[in-house]
Amino acid sequence: MKLRTGIPAFLAICCLLAACQGDKTDTEGKTESTGNAAAVQSTAGASDETQTETESIAEKREAENTAELPCLKEIYGTYGMKAGTCLSPEMIHTPAYESLIREQFNSVTMENLLKPEAILNREESRKAGNLVVEFSPELVELLDWTREKDMAVRGHTFVWYSQTPDWIYYEDFDPDKKFVSREEMLLRMESYISQVFGLLDEGGYLDQFYAYDVVNEALMEDGTLRENNWKTIIGDDYLWYAFSYADAYAPDSVDLYLNDYNEQYKPYAISKIVKTLVDENGRSLVDGIGLQAHLYTQDDYYKYFQAVDTLAATGLKLEITELDMSLGTWQQTLEANEENLSLQGERYQKLIAGLIDRIEKGSLSMDAITFWGFADPLSWKSETYPLLFDGNLDPKPAFFGAALEEE
Ligand code: GLA
């Protein structure tokens, strides 16, 4: 098993461009990415050079017969789960990344290109007098790729306080004017959600989708509702409306998720809120709870599994939606040395094995485990080495741990 020895310069550049722009730190170490879409675009300019370099990595991987690596999608498939990664244009334009994704994963989540800021078009909204959704050519290319490669897709995300353009909340889509009324904001929300499902259907992509994050990060760590413009304008029931509209426009084959971060600190608040998201007959509008699982190797895993058990007791499905495991704690990153990387492998193994144990006992229903990427240099938290492969695409102990191999 090889250890990480350093990131090749070209990947370090990708990492700086793709992962680090516009991040800001929140409480409990949660970092919100505010500028990733722009960063992804800026990597496009560097792609020629990146491509040549990564092609030689692809050749190297082939020569080393990496097909002999354990295969996450097969291993998780044994337990009825998909193995997922987030997806960006860079990943499908770079042969070594693309083939690794196809080898190991059978589900993807668009890293940025389905987020509100990437699909809501201000000019068209102004002309139409209603929110207008438009898929970018980059998104269409990724969606075409998922269909060609028969990849399942998690939709991410409709209603979120972040990576959402400010103009959507104002009269005439003009932030210099007043907020629209509650009624108008509800119309905009409904139209936005229905258009996304409509466009996915028209493009012939809807069959790829099995889950959609309807609301992202609605709760604070203390369990209170996060303040955001949706809540200010519509009221606390903005969540209920988001799920009702999604329920009305999504086909039955798409499960609707409430996705949240630092889930281990607020399982009771999440459980409480999903119980309120029911229709007039008491049917749950929520199919599942997304656990982002941006974890740290020094986290308290007993506490994490307590949260999993509390959330599973709602009877809803759970999904691990954005898994990564940084070295150390949120206050202090540990060095990527043999000991820490090996501990990371052990922690990944314990996490996945603990989930599978619950699935086998029937106390947990889970369709997928999605990692927020696969190679450290591409991660939004690249400086904490949180993923499964290093910059040469060599598997880390983390990969073998995620593949359930014990050291
Ligand atoms: C949150 C979001 C993701 C992503 C990560 C950081 O967890 O749900 O879409 O932006 O932050 O990259």
Image (tube, rainbow, N blue to C red):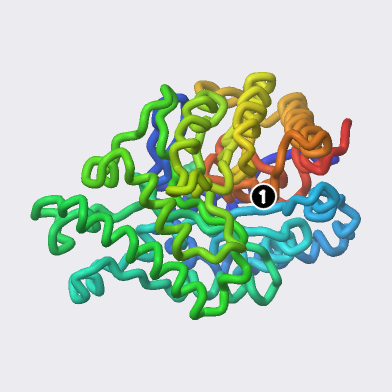
Decide if residue 78 is on the left or right side of residue 333. right
Report x, y in % for residue 241: 36, 51
Q: Quadrant of residue 381?
A: top right
Extreme residue in the left direction: 177
Extreme residue in the front direction: 281
Report x, y in % for residue 152: 66, 63
Nearest to the observer: residue 197 or residue 335: 197
Decide if residue 389 is on the left or right side of residue 129. right
Secondary structure under the numbered disc 1 in the rendered image: loop
Q: At 33% across and 66% down in the image, what residue appears?
A: 191
Q: At 47% across and 58% down in the image, what residue appears?
A: 247
Up the image or down, 354 lies above or below 185; here it is: above
Quarter placement of the N terminus: top right
Q: Quadrant of residue 210?
A: bottom right
Residue 399 seen in this snapshot: yes
Report x, y in % for residue 67: 87, 59
Decide if residue 402 is on the left or right side of residue 98. right
Amino acid beneath label 1: Phe
Q: At 70% across and 50% down in the image, what residue appears?
A: 367
Q: Quadrant of residue 91?
A: bottom right
Q: At 60% across and 47% down in the image, what residue appears?
A: 372
Up the image or down, 327 lies above or below 45; here it is: above
Other-residue count near label 1 (Cα within 10 Å), few / some / many at <14 / 14–19 / ≥20: many
Residue denoted by label 1: 374
Report x, y in % for residue 174: 14, 59
Quarter placement of the C terminus: top right
Residue 111 seen in this snapshot: no
